[in-house]
Image (cartoon, rainbow, N blue to C red):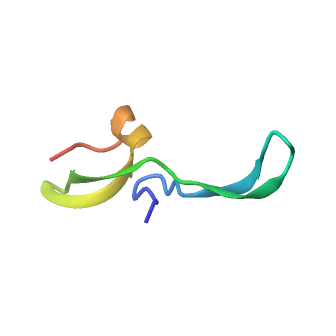
Amino acid sequence: MAKCAICSKGAHFGIKVSHSHRRSNKIWKANVKSVKVKVNGAAKKMYVCTSCLRSGAVERA
């Protein structure tokens, strides 16, 4: 469940390349936290990425 409820930032897929150039699939997950957020004056629990928390896109309850 690594998906931000505000900006919809989610997992990214790619290929990991080792020093010997062996390639394998890799997933990079978004830094998502479960926080209580004020929504219309009421507290609600959401998954929010840390960049949205730092930018002030949401207000903690």
Q: Residue drawn 81% across and 39% down?
A: 19
Is residue 31 shown left or right of residue 36? right
Which of the pair 3/19 is nearer the observer? 19
Which of the pair 6/41 is nearer the observer? 6
Q: Can you name the residue that lies furthest to the front here?
A: 20
Point out residue 58 in the picture as x, y percentages from the top left corner: 30, 44
Point out residue 25 in the picture as x, y percentages from the top left corner: 73, 60
How many numbered badges does the structure rendering display? 0
Q: Residue drawn 49% across and 57% down?
A: 8
- Vertical position of residue 59 compared to residue 32: above or below: above
Which of the pair 6/36 is nearer the observer? 36
Q: Can you name the residue that lies furthest to the right here?
A: 21
Q: Residue drawn 29% across and 59% down?
A: 46
Q: Residue drawn 67% across and 57% down?
A: 26
Q: Quadrant of residue 20?
A: top right
Is residue 42 shown left or right of residue 31? left
Is residue 18 shown left or right of residue 35? right
Point out residue 45 in the picture as x, y percentages from the top left corner: 22, 60
Is residue 39 shown left or right of residue 32? left
If the image is split into quadrants, where does the N terminus sit? bottom left
Q: Quadrant of residue 21?
A: top right
Which of the pair 43/34 is nearer the observer? 34
